[in-house]
Image: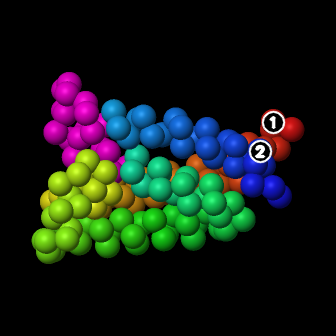
Amino acid sequence: MSFFSKRRMWTLVSILIITPIGFFCKFYRGPAAHWVNDSLGGLFYEIFWCLVLFLFFVKSKPWLIALIVLFATCLLEFLQLWHPQFLEILRRYFIGAMILGTSFTWTDFPYYFFGSGIGWLWMRWLKNKTWQIIE
């Protein structure tokens, strides 16, 4: 399987779909904005990272990628309790704040689990169906 396989192409298309949705959640200013900005965005964050890893490791098991992403995200959430100077410097920048987060909250965890679950289902779909349907 070459790097530019149909599976990878459709994974990239999926990333190009999920990324603006995730950013929209961060900048949304309508009803329930606080919930959309701070909680719902975590769901799309998980899906995004599942798809990014799947792009490079398409032969890996989707459940393993989803589990790794979930573990890493939970670890990052707990890192938000730690405020050493080097992390605070990174968090001052938009991309640092998006990846590392800025404040710990227990209520983010259900969104991480649900997002990883959706990411797992999405990767399974990409692995098993997408490229077979299109060929």
**SS for tag 1?**
helix
| Residue at left offset 39%, top offset 51% | 45
- By what rule are the colours in the image chosen? rainbow
**What residue is at 49 percent from the left and 69 percent from the top?**
67
Which element carries disc 2, helix, strand or loop? helix
> Which of these two is toward me, 19 or 114?
19
Q: Which mark is residue 134?
A: 1
Q: Residue at x 31, y 51 (%)?
A: 95
Residue 63 - label: none
Q: Are marks 1 and 2 in contact (CB under 8 Å)?
A: yes
- Examine the rendering and report whether any part of residue 106 can be seen: no
| Marks 1, 2: nearer the viewer | 2
Asked if residue 46 can be seen in this view, the reply is yes
Q: Looking at the image, which is closer to me, 93 or 105?
A: 93
C-alpha span from label 1 to label 2: 8 Å
Residue 109 horizontal/vertical position (percent)? 29, 62
Residue 31 lies in the magenta-colored region: yes
**118 up-or-down from 113: above or below:** above
Tag 1: residue type?
A: Ile
Q: Is residue 62 above or below residue 28?
A: below
At a point 61% along the width and 44% down the height, the residue shown is: 12
Q: Residues within 10 Å of mark 1 (few under 14, many from 20)?
A: few
Q: Position of residue 117 (x, y in %)?
A: 48, 57
The segment highlighted magenta reads 25-43
Residue tagged by mark 2? 6
